[in-house]
Image (tube, helix red, strand yellow):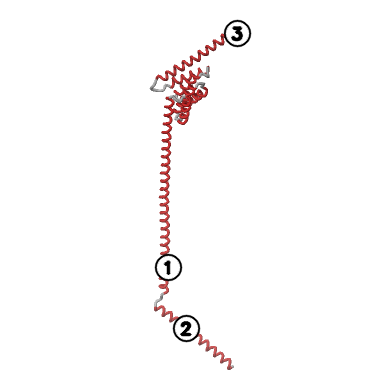
Amino acid sequence: MKRYLLLNLVLFTAFVAQAQSERKFVREGNKMYEAGLKDTAKLDTVSFGKAEVAYRRALELKPDDKQWQFNLADALYKQKKADESAKEFENIAEKAPLPADKAKAFHNMGNSFLVQKKLDESIATYKKALRIAPNDPQTKYNLAYAMKMKKEDDKKKQQNKDKDKDKKDKDKDKNKDQNKDQNKDQNKDQNKDQNKDQNKDQDKKNQDQNKDQQKDQQQPQQNKISKQNAEQMLQALENDEKQTQEKVKKAQALKAEKRNVEKNW
């Protein structure tokens, strides 16, 4: 019996020591968190970082404590670890038994999305919070602010899209004009070369015609003879004719003489 009581006493003492250790870490985390909030001129990420470490130690000993989970998520948010804080708040919202805690978790989760410029996600998350707590003024204000940012962002994107479209159209028109001018210059050069070739061919043709004309003009001049030369040529022909006739007569006479001689014989 004494042994049983001693065992229970030891276990109870260990539980109390653990609880005291948890509260110690939580008190340390709260102290660092408050220290980070004091300096409004700048964000004291060092103090919030120390608070994060202390809250994580406390949660290692008591993982299901919702208040300490809230504190850890807040410390992450203050260090601009918005992605991590959003995940922590989502986890809290899923497991929180009370509607008020769920609404608060969704509200803070929306803030984590908002600072990341994830406007669609933040708007959807604020709406989840308002479905649970429709009269919460801070959530209403944050939702309106996120929707305004969304509208301005969409307008800016549309303006950039229109600007890009105008630029593309201008570039297209510019390229079209450049191609038109280029084709015009090419056609101009081509016509110029073609006319040049045609003129060159025509010049060559004219030169050939002139040569032929000169040749035709020179041909009669080369065949043309003087009167004296013509008379000499006629005289030579007459002499040849006389000589030919004399030869014919002599031949005929010789033939007749031969015939007579043969006959007398």
Q: Secondary structure at mark 2?
A: helix
Q: Real-space Cα distance between discs 2 and 3?
A: 180 Å
Element type at marker 1?
Answer: helix
Measured as percent of width and height from the top left, residue 184 is found at 41, 52
> Which residue has dot 3 on it?
4
Residue in the image at 43% along x and 27% along y: 140
Q: Would you call the spot at circle 1 few (<14 residues within 10 Å), some (14-19), or many (20 or more)?
A: few
Q: Nearer the viewer, mark 3 or mark 1?
A: 3
Residue in view at x 49 percent, y 84 percent: 244
Which x, y percent locates residue 21? 50, 14
Q: Residue furthest top?
A: 2
**Callout 3: SS:** helix
What residue occupies the far front of the structure in this picture? 135
Q: Quadrant of residue 259?
A: bottom right
Q: Are marks 2 and 3 in contact (CB under 8 Å)?
A: no
Q: Amino acid at mark 3?
A: Tyr
Question: For residue 212, what is the image quadrant?
Answer: bottom left
* Of pointers 2 and 3, the one earlier in the residue sequence: 3
First along the sequence among labels 3 and 1: 3
Residue 51 shows up from this direction: yes
Examine the rendered structure and indicate whether residue 207 appears above or below residue 63: below
Q: Residue 41 location, x and y as percent?
A: 38, 22
Q: Earlier in the sequence, mark 1 or mark 2?
A: 1
Of the residues tagged 2 and 3, which is closer to the observer? 3
Q: Which residue is mark 1?
A: 212
Decide: marks 1, 2 in contact (CB < 8 A)? no
> Residue flagged by tag 2: what amino acid is it?
Glu
Quarter the N terminus occupies: top right
Q: Residue furthest bottom?
A: 264
Q: Which residue is mark 2?
A: 241
